Image: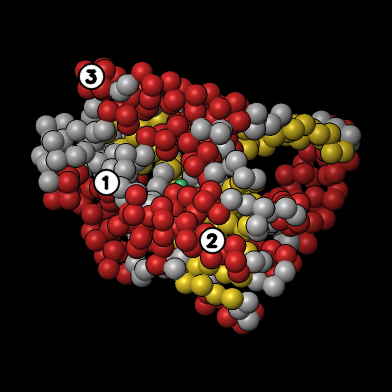
Amino acid sequence: MKKIINPDKNKWEEILRRPTKSVEDVEKTVYQIFGEVKSKGNEAVAKYTQLFDGISLETEIVSEEEIKAAETKISEELKEAINLAKNNIERFHAAQETDKVSVETTPGVHCWQEKKAIQKIGLYIPGGTAPLFSTILMLAVPAKLAGCEEIVLCSPPDKKGELNPAILYTANLCGVSKIFKVGGIQAIAALTFGTETIPKVYKIFGPGNQFVTVAKQLATKYNVAIDMPAGPSELLVVADESANAAFVASDLLSQAEHGIDSQVILISLSEPFLEDVEKEIIKQLPELPRNEIAKAAMENSRLIVVKDEQEALEMINEYGPEHFIICLKNEDVFIDGIINAGSVFIGNFTPESAGDYASGTNHTLPTNGYAKQYSGVNLDSFMRAVTFQRISEEGIKNIGSAIELMAEAEGLQAHKNAVTLRLNSLK
Ligand SMILES: [Zn+2]
């Protein structure tokens, strides 16, 4: 943990730098696998599943029997917990639905806008050190609410060729149409081009390692949209003595255990409080089963003392954290002043874990500073706004000559004609 006391403004950039890596080596591999999946379909998918996951599967698609079997492997308590989370996520995302916008901009000129669901979407759920079935809730629930017709899920199989039962159970519960045991670059490539069994989709959602991230970026070159550019998870806490040092330490560690490249930052106006938190981190860390990961991540972390609230706020907006916890007496300064953050957590009893699982907000959020220009996943992420217009005879008379003049001025004669012909027909 690096402790920094009252840093000079010209040092901020260096202090707030994220531990991101270069992607050049990754890019070459991604291009190669995309090329093979595009030309050879399932044969290439099987080859890379064998290579990266060490398993040769008869078929990648998950069967009804496997889903049924998964259901028996989940405890009733966990099922209830998943249900509670699902209900809250449903309630919060259903409330995001917007009304149709309809305006008569000029007499006789009617314009309206309606949201339409993206018909086919792909969800990527990583395997590896933690089975992120909570991410299925965060993606499939709003997709279903939006009205997406086909929801395809890909996740890498384990050494036995299976998916974690919690992943299968949650996917089935949330109405995922098809589940495939395919991971990594080959999964993103399959969702991009389609194979004999895996459907091509219009938009791909979900987290992943560096390979998956670069693969999703490449997918955008083939007319596939993605949720957002991904990066390692991060948390920034601003706190004073009114916060509980043990709570703050537990929040910092909860984010640190995501991965060795996670980054956590604590900003405080008080050095003694910072030291209390540090002591708590040292106390809590060894108890965690994932302490190796959390410890490595804590090495990228920063404990910063700043001189006043305004400076703290400025620094936080400069960093643009994915998760932002506000835990101090004068919380309004930060609630009102925060501009760049993915998701904000307020008060002593609002751990970041709540948003990760069950409060109702989405946990798929912009990292790596992208909170400055991207929103987290929400209902609109699964929809597009389509505009409509109908112009009456009166309407074209009202705006026709303006269109003619503008088209003429841009040198687009055919555009002008399309209006002139209609206006003449009304004379
Ligand atoms: Zn988290």
Q: Tell how many labels.
A: 3
> Does label 1 or label 2 sit earlier along the sequence?
1
Residue 396 horizontal/vertical position (percent): 83, 38
Give the residue pinned by disc 2.
276
Q: Quadrant of residue 317?
A: bottom right
Amino acid type, mark 3: Ala
Amino acid type, mark 2: Asp
Amino acid type, mark 1: Gly
Judge depth for marks 1 and 2 and give the one in front.
Answer: 2
Ligand 1 lies under 8 Å from the Cβ of mark 1: no
Q: Nearer the viewer, residue 182 or 409?
A: 182
**Is residue 223 at least partly visible in the picture?**
no
Side (left or right) of 366 relative to 69: right
Give the residue pinned by disc 1.
128
> Does label 2 or label 3 sit earlier along the sequence?
3
| Neighbour tally class for label 3: few under 14, some 14-19, many 20 plus, Cα within 10 Å | some
Residue at the image position 30 percent from the left and 64 percent from the top: 27
